[in-house]
Image (spheres, rainbow, N blue to C red):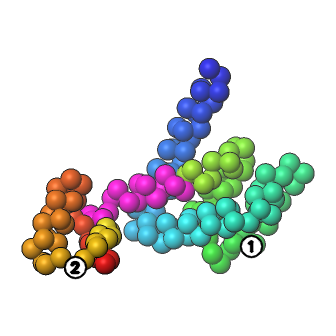
Amino acid sequence: MIQLKKQAMHNRDVIKFAQAVFDVSSKSNLVLDTSKRLNNLLFIFNSCSELRLFLFSRRIQIPKKIEILKNVFNKNLTVLELDLVENLLENGNISLLSLIIKRFNYLYDNTESSFKVTVSLAEQLNSDELSEIINGVEKMLDKKIEANVEI
């Protein structure tokens, strides 16, 4: 029961942080750029065990971690992304970083006016058949799609 409450609180935090970052980047018309930077951070976070060890370490004081992160990532991240990491560190929620970035990407993907879809086919279709497939998918998704056909 306690575990479920804790998980629900984390889910609310993930939604709250992701929405806040999304709102700030939207107001600046920098959602795409923010998404790219956050995805780069997520890639580094997931692939570099040393970074995770550094971020989760209790031996290094939070102000020192923030100073080091700002020096290391000053050319790759903006104040928005660095403030997110800083806030997560200060509140002991750095473990939510990857979930927040994934939620941000979800918000970003759902605001796009079109979806990118790959259609994999065994053989070439004529344009009428392909249009029929595309129209069917657009109806299901209720969004315009950009189809990439692979044979």
Residue 135, percent across and down?
A: 15, 63
Please state if 133 lies on the left or on the right of 150 as rendered.
left
Q: Secondary structure at mark 2?
A: loop
Q: Main secondary structure of the magenta part?
A: helix
Q: Secondary structure at mark 1?
A: helix
Which residue is most to the right? 59
Going 12% across and 66% down the picture, which residue do you hit?
Answer: 132
Please state if 79 lies on the left or on the right of 138 as rendered.
right
Q: CA distance from mark 1 to mark 2?
A: 50 Å
Looking at the picture, tell me which residue is in the foreground, 141 or 96.
141
Which numbered disc, 1 or 2, marks the residue closer to the eye? Answer: 2
Q: Place residue 91 in its image quadrant.
A: top right
Going 77% across and 62% down the picture, which residue do you hit?
Answer: 49
Crowding at label 2, few (<14), some or many (≥20) Cα neighbours within 10 Å? few
Which residue is most to the left? 128
Residue tagged 2: 124
What span is colored magenta in the figure?
A: 101-115
Q: Earlier in the sequence, mark 1 or mark 2?
A: 1
Going 59% across and 38% down the picture, which residue do you hit?
Answer: 10
Task: Locate the C terminus and report the quarter of the image it occupies.
Answer: bottom left
Residue 14, percent across and down?
A: 55, 45
